[in-house]
Image (cartoon, helix red, strand yellow):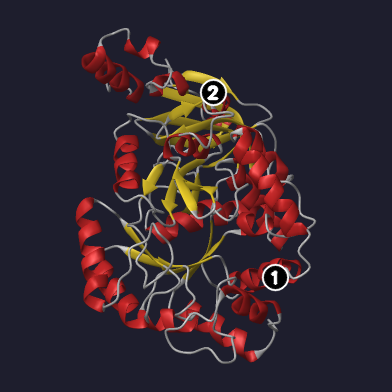
Amino acid sequence: MRMTVRALVVVSVAQAFGPAFAQQNSDAIENFISVNAEVIALTHVRVIDGTGAAARDDQTIIIRDEAIAALGDAARTPPPDGAKILDLSGRSVIPGLVMMHEHLYYPTGPGVYGQLGASFSRLYLAGGVTTMRTGGNMHGIFDINLARRIADWELPGPDIDATAPYVNGPNTFLQLHAVKTPQEARSHVAYWAGQGATSVKAYMQISRAALKAAIDEAHARRMKVTGHLCSVTYAEAADLGIDNLEHGFMPATDFVADKQPDVCPGQARGQQAIAALDDNAAPFKALVKKLVDRRVALTSTLTVFETFTAGRPIPPGLEVLTPTLKDSFLRSRERAAANPQSAYAKLFPKNLTLERAFARAGGLLTAGTDPTGFGGVVPGFSNQRQVELLVEEGFTPLEAISIATLNGAKYLGRDARIGTIAAGKQADLVVINGNPARTIADIRRVETVFKKGVGFDPAKLIASVSGQVGIW
């Protein structure tokens, strides 16, 4: 008989620290596990499978060996003998969220990014995120080591596709290395690939030559490259072979009239051009066609831009922050709302239109949250909010859920294993008390998160860090 993951955790903890360790250590992973057995049957549940298909009521899901062993109508799918049975009448199950722009750091002061990976990984999992890509790395080996420890079931959290530290040109960020030549870009990618990074992210001041070298080196190592760009336009990056572009069309500088090669014209000028852009005109349609033809994905991060936009709701989850961080965000939010020069009143809704046009044209739109800016984007809570904002963008709830699950899995090349609910797939599942196919706000009502068939308790994960996020 297979030893369950929980049993493996208990054995490893006992061998390393003694049998009483798990009871004494409040951070032990098993303290956050609520469901684990050799065979689990989720009965009478509504299945929203992530493909965009209509929800199916009164289903049974059988979980065995970390995977979905069977799925079908409850009347024709009886639980196996000895299975742990959970009656989920009135509940829905969606695939675990696969989010493509997350961070393990957070703004903790002017120009300072604190490493909060320990608390963030719990919050991401509590929010239903079972797989995530870090969309940038400020702290070197930390992200990579955390990904390894989570994979070894030492710590709770999503599976992590860990980016290398940003590959960028000369810049003012104290925590970013600057590459000045193509060879330096190649060396940067090669070094961090050797350390265990699995993705690469280019940043705003990189040159075309350095970006091309980074892309070539990454592709030779079967790594994908994303970018938050400025000095390089979206069209140029697509021609160079980039795989993904971040933040929808918000950072695009393709439409700045006097844009100079390899020079960032400044965020404000780029945003002004996007805010004034005619999405029905030929220049935008030509850019979309190029991105679609080159198979360049786009990551939507509406949550971070919502915090900059006057009149938008206060973001969820602020209560888990330290009082200092919470107060700092609220003060910054007030200043941003009072700024008459802010472009976001026009820019935020325009980006909704542009992202939707990209997706409707056949582009691969993925979802992320980007917990940066001046704060307020809280992991887990913001991932749920991002799905809500996709519905505001014009997608149906079923489409929005698919963008946040299947599309991320497709980008990572893991859609044969994750991103949808089907027999044979990995049992990454989110149990929701409600019906997000009808009311997308129900996506916040998460009761259990299954990762590889092990059920985690979101309330316990959140309670373990509440009021302390900002310290660790």
Secondary structure found at label 2: helix
When the figure is inspected, residue 28 is found, relative to residue 381, above or below; the finding is: above
Mark 2 = which residue? Answer: 460
Quarter of the image for the N terminus: give it: top left
Q: Position of residue 31 (x, y in %)?
A: 44, 18
- Mark 1 residue crowding within 10 angstroms, few (<14) / some (14–19) / many (20+): many
Q: Which residue appears at 50% of the width and 55% of the height?
A: 111
Q: Is residue 442 left or right of residue 24?
A: right
Point out the tag, 2 or 1, that comes first from the N-terminus: 1
Q: Which residue appears at 67% of the width and 31% of the height?
A: 433
Q: Nearer the viewer, mark 2 or mark 1?
A: 1
Q: Position of residue 259 (x, y in %)?
A: 53, 88
Q: Position of residue 123 (x, y in %)?
A: 52, 36
Mark 1 = which residue? Answer: 347
Amino acid at pointer 2: Lys
Secondary structure found at label 1: helix
Q: Quadrant of residue 340?
A: bottom right
Q: Quadrant of residue 187?
A: bottom left
When the figure is inspected, residue 208 is found, relative to residue 69, above or below; the finding is: below
Viewer-proximal residue, 354 or 270?
Answer: 270
When the figure is inspected, residue 157 is found, relative to residue 20, above or below; the finding is: below
